[in-house]
Image (cartoon, rainbow, N blue to C red):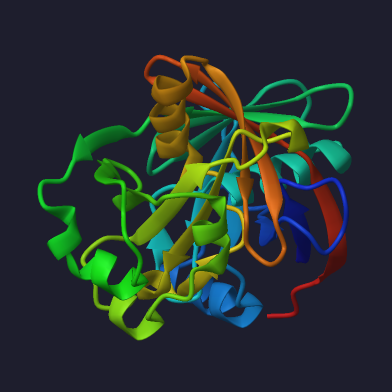
């Protein structure tokens, strides 16, 4: 069985967010324990498993994502990585529809190699007295605003003063691991939009086995409506300012958010068990 490692939301190797991708020949998934063991062995933020569906189905492929410790209800970068593998191997053409825990998600590749994901837009609920939350305390910085983002991602979205604050964050990971949400997105407006991005972010999710996610597509389903409302534009570019970095182009389309980025296969191997 083939397994590939694909760097997503980047156009060069060793940047963006790496994801494991396993295309299954069967018409169903192996048992959950095996899927989780493989994801733990790969030990990346997510490993994606996909199998083809019958022609009459509402989608073309069934898709699931696992962190090293749990199944994820939504994952952008591993969906982009899976689409990249389907396209580059000839296993799929045109728009690909995936049946997932977050409903049917579609992905379309353009002639230049970029892939656009069609995901549900997150709903944002402003939090009262956010400075008293455990998440804010674990970050150790002053905040501008805080919102809960749901329903599929269950993240706390926190705006801080500026890009420098986002880049310099050194949160208490042990404290963040005890929070009730999937993760914490920290964001700010770009210091210089002339550099090619409108806002920056970082995401910490140690409770699901990811101390810091390099580039998080799903988080941009919350970042897109947040910053689009602020800037008065539906199309933006976000830079996730992790050590690897990556760019996510967002386009707000009401209750759907389009996420666009590139991908590069860096490892193509065989899963022996």
Q: Position of residue 114 (x, y in %)?
A: 79, 32
Q: Position of residue 167 (x, y in %)?
A: 58, 62
Residue 248, image quadrant: top right
Q: Position of residue 15 (x, y in %)?
A: 78, 59
Give whichever of 143, 31 is nearer the camera.
143
Give the quadrant of the N terminus. bottom right
Left or right, residue 15 beside residue 36: right
- Farthest-out residue, bottom: 174
From where the camera sits, is residue 229 visible?
Answer: yes
Check the image and report above or below for 254 versus 272. Answer: above
Left or right, residue 33 beside residue 133: right
Q: Position of residue 206 (x, y in %)?
A: 41, 74
Give whichever of 57, 124 is nearer the camera.
124
Check the image and report above or below for 7 versus 58. Answer: below
From where the camera sits, is residue 28 visible?
Answer: no
Give the quadrant of the C terminus. bottom right
Residue at horizontal 51 percent and vertical 31 percent from the top: 105
Residue at horizontal 78 percent and vertical 40 percent from the top: 262
Give whichever of 174, 265 is nearer the camera.
174
Residue at horizontal 36 percent and vertical 61 percent from the top: 183
Check the image and report above or below for 223 versus 269. Answer: above
Left or right, residue 110 beside residue 239: right
């Amino acid at each position: 069985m083939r397994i590939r490692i694909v760097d997503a939301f980047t156009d060069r190797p060793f940047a963006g967010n790496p994801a494991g991708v396993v295309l299954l020949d069967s018409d169903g998934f192996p048992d959950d324990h095996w899927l989780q063991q493989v994801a733990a062995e790969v030990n990346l933020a997510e490993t994606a498993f996909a199998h083809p569906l019958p022609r009459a189905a509402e989608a073309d492929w069934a898709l699931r994502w696992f962190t090293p410790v749990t199944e994820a209800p939504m994952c952008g970068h591993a969906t982009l990585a899976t689409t990249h593998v389907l396209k580059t191997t000839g296993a799929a053409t045109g728009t690909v529809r995936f049946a997932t825990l977050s409903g049917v998600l579609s992905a379309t590749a353009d002639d230049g190699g970029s892939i656009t994901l069609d995901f549900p837009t997150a709903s944002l609920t402003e939090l009262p007295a956010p400075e008293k939350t455990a998440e804010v305390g674990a970050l150790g910085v002053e905040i501008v605003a805080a919102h809960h983002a749901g329903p599929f991602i269950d993240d706390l979205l926190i705006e801080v003063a500026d890009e420098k604050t986002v880049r310099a964050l050194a949160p208490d990971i042990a404290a963040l691991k005890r929070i009730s949400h999937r993760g914490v997105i920290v964001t700010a407006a770009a210091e210089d939009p002339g550099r090619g991005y409108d806002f920056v972010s970082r995401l910490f999710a140690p409770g699901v086995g990811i101390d810091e996610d390099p580039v998080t597509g799903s988080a941009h389903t919350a970042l897109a409506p947040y910053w689009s409302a602020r800037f008065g534009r539906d199309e933006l570019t976000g830079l996730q300012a992790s050590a690897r970095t990556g760019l996510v182009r967002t386009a707000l389309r009401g209750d759907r958010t389009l996420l666009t980025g590139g991908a590069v296969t860096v490892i193509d191997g065989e899963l022996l068990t």
